Image: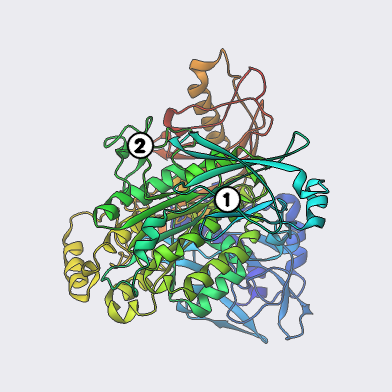
Amino acid sequence: MSLNDEERSGGSQLNLIFLVASLFQIHADSIMPFGISKRQTSRKRDCLSSHLKIARPNAIQKRGTNLKAGEYTNEYEYIWYRKEETGSNGLPVALSPNQCTASVISGLSYYLWKKSAKVTIVDPVDIKSKSYFVDTPGCRLLALNVMNDQLRKYVKQLKEPDCGTPLLRISKTGSQLWVNVDKKGLLKMYNVPKLEDIECLYHIFERITDFRNVILDTVAFKLSYRKPVKLKKHFDLLRVECRHENLLIYTDCFYILNRTKLSESTKGEDAKTNRLSVMILGIDALSHVNFLRQMPKTAEFIKQNLSHVEFFGYNKVDENTFPNLIPLLTGLKTKQLSEFCNISREMDDCPIIWKRFKEAGYKTAYGEDLQHLTLFQYNRAGFEKQPTDFYFRTFALEMSKLKWGRDRNTYACYGKRAPLEMLLDYIRNLVPFMQYNDFFSLFWSISLSHDDLNTPQFLDKPFLNLLKLFDSTKILNKTAIFLMSDHGLRLGNFRLTHQGEMEDMEPLLITLLPKWFESKYPEAIKNMRINANRLTTHFDVYATMLDLIDLEYISDVSIQNRIIELTKKSRMPRSISLFLPISDRRTCFLADIPDTYCGCFDRISIPINASMVEFAAKFIVDEINQILEPHLTKCAKLELHLIRHASFMSNAMRFKKYHPFRLQDVFVQLQTVPGYGIFEATVRSTAGRSTLSDNITRINRYENQIIQTFSLNQRKGFELKEKKI
């Protein structure tokens, strides 16, 4: 049927609406508007009368740009074209969303693209890899744009913070301090004309706890451009203070890696082992798509030079960092971890994966750049004893006392150093040790990604240089690196968008493996490449790292035997090694991903004034107030201020009507008063009874609001009547 025939029949939109209704077993009335108001109707008719040529979902990749063969949108939409508006390639130009676009539904089907005056039906197979990152019976995960016109307004070039130049530097051997600025720099940066007028001390210190260091000795010294300062032997950490006319002008800290271990490890040629070192190289709050957007040089270097597997179906399993990284490091959920250790106290007894590697004879290292937000110390007690052989925390804790340049939750500088550069310098200094030892390491960057969509652009050059160093020193020839994140950006204006919501669920994961690895373990790598477009989680990475302790587990024979064992299991495991084929029937339920954080749902945008939405919003606010009820002496009762957007979430296309895994929920983003908190939650209605399918999540910043956090069911973000924080 041609478009003019459909227009005359008056049924094209109604037919599609009833199709959606029938597929999802819902009343057509509840989805009839699809975001189209009565005021828009005449405008749509104007568009329809303007020589319509195409009216099918998924016809172009970017609205407002020329339609190209083989390019498709990430959402299924009606797109209208005017015959007279064509590009240089002769294909029509899509009208902008506010002209002639009505959102329909992601995941229904796709139809066609226009070629000359004819309509061509394209094989649905052609679009799967382009419309969905994952397209399996268990999960359909929409492919997201790295950049388009809608995203461009959120992406900005920023000015990189400048922390200054340190007055001193330490020699490679760790035995001397040298002046790091010339006479001109001394005057410009420290306002001191003569170096000899500066008086300095260095304090040797050591760790007492994760939150306190103690000074062991203090030594006074003078500075000279020609002669270095000779340091005492047999120390690991020192703090330097320099004064000019009794005014403190410079404070810094230095570390010396254990020389005995390093000297022993570098004797002779490369140590030949049958094992791989394992490194987690993490960037906090970085989605897969934002990595490609903000770190293109690093992404291109990996693509062109390194043996790797890039995962497109990697889905977070909980809200924020701790409940996502605990599965990565223990294979357990936070509540399950409490059965093994008391996480409200020091976490020495917790079964963290570095213990498994330590038992197997590996050396261990752990470091994060921003000390007030570290995984085991933020609102937690840390460790009583130093947990790894090389522990960045002790040095960085002392440096964190020099923090400045606060921006929301992060600090740009520790003294004259950027926290990220401190961590990368620590990693670089470990390279000689890594070359000759089996090594498990966890390095996590927070400072340039935690709070902002655009600050990861400052990670591009440093991470590119780090990977080049690993390549040139052959670290990559003996190490499996998991370049990854915990989740996407969780806060801010971008997170309020649909794309921001989806990116939050889809963190970065790229595995970097030695170039010889695939030829030696072909079955394991074949399965890993299959899993690149399957639903995967932090639990799977944990299982994968365990496999790397003994490579016999991933030999072709072992892989084949393990596949047989896997298929015999009555229930699909939650943790499946990425070296094994993950079933295409895997759902968020089977992967233990709560609905709120599941990116697999087909979502229909529905009007915010729909009765089901208004009911769900009121239900969510009532639930919040029920949690607040015991605290009403301190907390104000919340009222619904407005509904920002809503969607009908369903996996109905994958399951029959009465299948137990079939889910149909209403997702609502709303704002409450007082405090203007923005919350998200999902309401599930079953047999006339409504429940919250998961936690209520607050997604905007507290800033200067009056706040209190409650641990009950991890539902956070309620307003206090007390003084502002």
Judged by depth in the image, the label closer to the viewer, 1 or 2, is 2
The label shown at residue 347 is 2
Query: Is residue 290 toward the left or the right of residue 91 in the image?
Result: left
The dot on residue 582 is none
From the viewer's perspective, is residue 105 above or below residue 241? below
Q: Is residue 632 above or below residue 142?
A: above
The earlier-in-sequence mark between 1 and 2 is: 2
Q: Mark 1 = which residue?
A: 489
Q: Position of residue 399 (x, y in %)?
A: 58, 42
Residue 112 can be seen in this image: yes
Considering every residue shown, the one lying at the far top of the view is 633
Kindly identify the residue that appears in the image at 72 percent across and 63 percent down: 100
Circle 2 sits in a helix, a strand or a loop, which is it?
Answer: loop
Q: Quadrant of the N terminus?
A: bottom right
Q: Amino acid at mark 2?
A: Met
Between 320 and 150, the one lying in front of the other is 320
